[in-house]
Amino acid sequence: MAKKKRTKKKSEIKKNDLVVILIPIIIIALLIGAVFAIKYIYKPKPKIQTLEFHGFIFKNESDIWTTQMQIKDQLYNLMFKYSPYDVENIKINYLPNNFSKLTSMHDYIYITFDPEDDNLAYIALGAADLGRALTRVYGIKPIAACTKNITEACSNVPIHTCDTTARPVIYLDDDPVQNITYEGNCLTIQGKKDDLLKAVQRVLFEWYKIIYNEG
């Protein structure tokens, strides 16, 4: 009988040792689980940066700048990649009123590009932003075009450069030199990647009368 008691006592000691080992492991596992649970369950609201520019209030959330503007009795929520302060020093080398006069004489405008240019994704983004603004500000329909017919996408759109039509044309040019010029019937916006998008946005702020051209 005494021998059995000793065996039972020994097994109880082993069980206690196992509990002592397991409890810290379980606690650590629970703590790790709690950390991950907090990370995925509790998602704090991102901080919203606010700035004022010429009476317009801009808010930045998730790297997008937004503001509101009333155009022809309708309130629009406008979205931009850059704030006005990011692009205000980009010079527009023409009188914007001349472009406004041209658009007033037509009901649509071509937005064209060279399909052999690099960085076509940036050109597409710029064209989309311009198209929305043309409709809102000038009430003019944007029509996508190419400067040459060498790709499948260009086979289904008009082929126009600045010299092939009397209609207004906006030419988006993938060029290392950032520039914004207007001659005849053609507004040329050029730049490389983000510089192109910044130049486009500088024009948009001008159209929306958020930035005033002093030249």
Image (tube, helix red, strand yellow):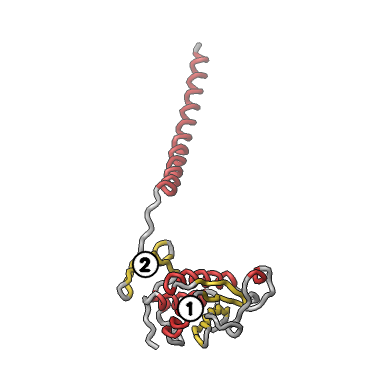
- Is residue 117 something that shows in the picture? no
- Choose between 158 and 87: the one closer to the eye: 158
**Type of the residue with mark 1:** Ala
- Is residue 172 something that shows in the picture? yes
User: Residue 161: x, y in percent?
Assistant: 60, 81
Q: Residues within 10 Å of mark 1 (few under 14, many from 20)?
A: many
Instruction: Give the residue at x 32% y 76%.
Output: 54
In which image quadrant can residue 76 be found? bottom left
Instruction: Give the residue at x 43% y 44%.
Output: 37
Q: In the rendered image, which residue does mark 2 sit on? A: 67
- Secondary structure at numbered mark 2: strand
In the displayed structure, 175 sits above or below 38; it is: below
Q: In the rendered image, which residue does mark 1 sit on? A: 199
In the displayed structure, 101 sits above or below 18; it is: below
Instruction: Give the residue at x 57% y 81%.
Output: 175
- Secondary structure at numbered mark 1: helix
Q: Earlier in the sequence, mark 1 or mark 2?
A: 2
In the displayed structure, 208 sits above or below 166; it is: above
